[in-house]
């Protein structure tokens, strides 16, 4: 092989290597979220049309809530869900976490007994969200999983750094409104509420309703 041909093939290999390197860097810069969503789109995860989002509500809230807040918060959840049902909202998405997510899922399941046309959809961040939970919490989680109308794993891997953020973004991108319980401005729930505002979702913060009730 002539020196010219060797140079030519070496240049081709260099360009191929450079291209692969750029693709790798591009994937890294785009972040894991885009990769995972693409993976699920390939597997057939249905996209949501803008007009359909008007009939879908998501929930976000703190995992740790004082026990004395439960009665007022549960009552506010029931009232808000019933109001949305009256406006035609049929699908309710929770992330399946402890605290507010669990209260919200339970409230939707109770509302479904009277309104069988509504659906509870779980958008879970990973395959082992409940791994470190207490047994009582795991039993409640299993009950919710067994009674949900649909369960989607935003990631098909065990827990990893960033999986909760992926789940939160999924909630916002597949909903037209958000019911929140946000009392702390530096939290995952606060980030989700900010993203919801950026995306133009209607946001109902039950913590503000609670404050009005107390006053």
Image (spheres, rainbow, N blue to C red):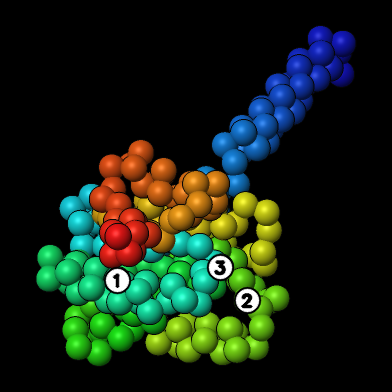
- Residue 11 falls in image quadrant: top right
Label number found at residue 181? none
Instruction: Give the Cα separation between the discs numbered 2 and 1.
Output: 26 Å
Nearer to us in this view, 10 or 156: 156
Nearer to us in this view, 180 or 206: 206
* Location of mark 1 (residue): 76
Residue 57: give x, y in percent of width and height.
Answer: 29, 62
Residue 136: give x, y in percent of width and height.
Answer: 60, 89
Label number found at residue 130? 2
Instruction: Give the Cα separation between the discs numbered 1 and 3.
Output: 17 Å
The answer to whether one can see residue 206 in this image is: no
Instruction: Give the Cα separation between the discs numbered 2 and 3.
Output: 15 Å
**In the rendered view, would you say 192 is above or below 143?**
above
Q: Residue at x 66, y 78 (%)?
A: 133
Q: Residue at x 25, y 90 (%)?
A: 113
Q: Secondary structure at mark 3?
A: loop
Residue 153: give x, y in percent of width and height.
Answer: 51, 67
Q: For the C terminus, give its image quadrant.
A: bottom left
Closest to the camera, between mark 2 and mark 3, is 3
- Residue 19 falls in image quadrant: top right
**In the rendered view, would you say 66 is above or below 193?**
below
- Residue 129 falls in image quadrant: bottom right
- Work out whether mark 2 precedes mark 1 in sequence or the reverse, and give the earlier one: 1
* Location of mark 3 (residue): 64
**In the rendered view, would you say 63 is above or below 53?**
below
- Work out whether mark 1 precedes mark 3 in sequence or the reverse, and give the earlier one: 3
- Work out whether mark 2 precedes mark 3 in sequence or the reverse, and give the earlier one: 3
Q: Secondary structure at mark 2?
A: loop
């Amino acid at each position: 092989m002539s020196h010219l041909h060797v140079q030519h093939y070496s240049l081709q290999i260099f360009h191929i290597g450079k291209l692969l390197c750029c693709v790798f860097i591009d994937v890294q810069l785009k972040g894991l979220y885009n990769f995972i969503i693409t993976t699920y789109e390939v597997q057939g995860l249905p996209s949501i049309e803008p007009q359909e989002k008007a009939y879908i509500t998501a929930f976000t809230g703190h995992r740790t809530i004082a026990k004395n807040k439960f009665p007022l918060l549960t009552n506010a959840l029931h009232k808000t869900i019933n109001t949305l049902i009256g406006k035609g909202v049929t699908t309710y998405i929770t992330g399946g976490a402890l605290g507010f997510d669990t209260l919200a899922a339970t409230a939707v399941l109770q509302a479904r007994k009277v309104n069988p046309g509504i659906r509870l959809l779980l958008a879970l961040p990973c395959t082992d969200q409940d791994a470190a939970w207490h047994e009582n919490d795991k039993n409640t989680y299993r009950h919710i999983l067994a009674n949900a109308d649909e369960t989607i794993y935003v990631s098909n891997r065990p827990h990893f750094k960033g999986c909760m953020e992926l789940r939160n973004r999924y909630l916002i991108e597949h909903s037209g409104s958000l019911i929140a319980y946000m009392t702390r401005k530096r939290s995952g729930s606060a980030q989700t509420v900010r993203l919801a505002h950026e995306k133009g979702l209607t946001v109902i913060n039950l913590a503000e309703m609670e404050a009005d009730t107390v006053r």
